[in-house]
Amino acid sequence: MSTTGPHELAAHLPADEIRRFHEVLARGGYNEEGLVGTLGPIQLPTLLRRDRAHFQHLTRRGRPLDLQIRLFLLGIPLTLEEARAALEPVGLEEWARAGLVGVQGGEVRGLVRIMAFRKLLLASDQLEAPGTIGRPDLVMGITSSTSTLADSAIPRPSRSTLDLGTGSGVQAFVAAAWSERVWAVDRSARSINFARFNAALNGVAAPIEFLEGDGFEPVRGRTFDRILSNPPFAVSPSFRYLYRDSGMEGDAFARGVIENAARCLNEGGYCQIVCDWAHVAGEDWKERLRAWFDGSGCDAWVMRTDTQEAAAYAHVWIRDTEHVGEEETDRLYAEWLAYYARQRIEAISTGLIAIRKAGEKPNWVRIEDGPGSTSGEFGEYVARGFELGDFLQRVASDEALLEVRLKVEPSARLDHVCEWEDASWRIRSAKIRLAGGLQYEANVDLRLAGMVALCDGLRTMREVLAHTAQALGADLDRITPNCLALTRQLIERGFLLPVAG
């Protein structure tokens, strides 16, 4: 598989020279705020196709930012005069020498797509640059899985962090904020080159070692406090794209990442991965997934975000990643479906998996549907979820839970659903939800909503249930088992939090 391309970024240039490109773009307002202010909160397509006229209209004012967006985000070529206006005071020749633009005749074309993410600017392949579409070593930019993993990353101090499958380097740069040292590994030489360039472009201060190689091989013998991975996780029948395909059967690659990560984690260390897993005919998908963690010495938390039937899954991946004609699309679709039939794969799920090395105690595994939405960076909520899992393990008996003091999470909200009846609104049902972080929600019995409100951090659960039984006119012994079961669910999802001591 060739790794030479029509252009390469000049990552060998001095870091201060590369940093100047960032300064020019930043001066023009090329950041998340500037892009949203110009284009609106839209999902940019991989290719412009029928959207070209619309984006040209949005960037019609001709400001330096408009011209930069056309050049580096939309792939619309500029005249020499426009390019100089957009890229000054750094000369056009320097941008070309770095591999960022190509100049031919009176036209300047962006050779990379530069995306803004948090405070970073990240160069990846510009898919509409000549010779880029269909490259097996294509370097992808920011995707939904990129942002999900970055938002979920636990931002606590780490002596050593591994970014496995670094791509353009984004997870390594996110981790650099709280890591003493980062290793960034990818099997694609072009990805490593892009990541090195992006590190210099953003002036990343923490030491990052970029290593080319397959899986954990380049860091053999090392252990880590944190591992982040957005690997090539598509359940696909072929090995066409390094960023998409693992070349292994079914979801074996994702399982291998989990199993190898468990061996490479320091005690108390976390691995977080975004991946897909298969639903195999005749097998319970949760039990099949649970086997990934057997003997790992790790606690595990799986949050499923989506499930698609095999045919729909194939359609979406082919539509989004294969830029070929109708006849070839039909052939690929038939190939994918035949592969799923041989593998007995009925559906594929996507989700976030987090494991924590905890080898000195019995391990727990939590597999569930993730919350309907999340708010901002939620890594601290992931860490808290593991702490709550440990707490529930310590108070496994009802008698132990009755002695605990709990308080309501400050972002918890209770919503009432009312129906109009007899010239008034009657409360018919209630829902408790979290307004921040992992935004879980759950229906709650109106009679037990008062029980939750009594959790003020001062009363024990024994006292809370005594008050609840009295208010309901119910037998305490009779309601206790169901109330404690509800309490465990509310603790697990972070609605109720234990009070220290």
Image (spheres, grey):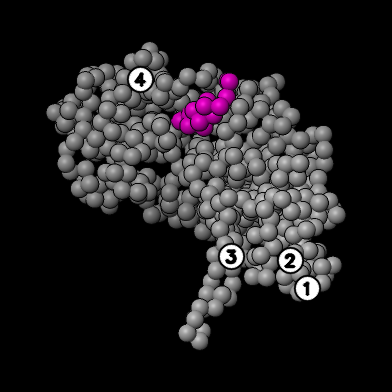
- The secondary structure type at the circle numbered 2 is helix
Q: CA distance from mark 1 to mark 4?
A: 69 Å
| Quarter of image, res 219 | top right
Please tell me which residue is depicted at 21% across the width and 20% down the height of the picture: 89
Q: CA distance from mark 3 to mark 4?
A: 50 Å
- The secondary structure type at the circle numbered 1 is loop
Q: Position of residue 406 (x, y in %)?
A: 71, 51
| Quarter of image, res 104 | top left
The circle drawn on residue 19 is: 4
In-front residue for pair 169/233:
169
Q: Amino acid at mark 1?
A: Ala
Q: Nearer the viewer, mark 1 or mark 4?
A: 1
Q: Position of residue 65 (x, y in %)?
A: 24, 35
Please tell me which residue is depicted at 29% across the width and 44% down the height of the picture: 37
* Sooner in the amino-acid sequence: mark 3 or mark 1: 3
Q: CA distance from mark 3 to mark 1?
A: 23 Å
Residue range in magenta is: 168-181
User: What residue is shown with label 1?
Assistant: 474
Q: Position of residue 490 (x, y in %)?
A: 68, 56
* Sooner in the amino-acid sequence: mark 2 or mark 4: 4
Q: Is residue 97 above or below residue 476?
A: above
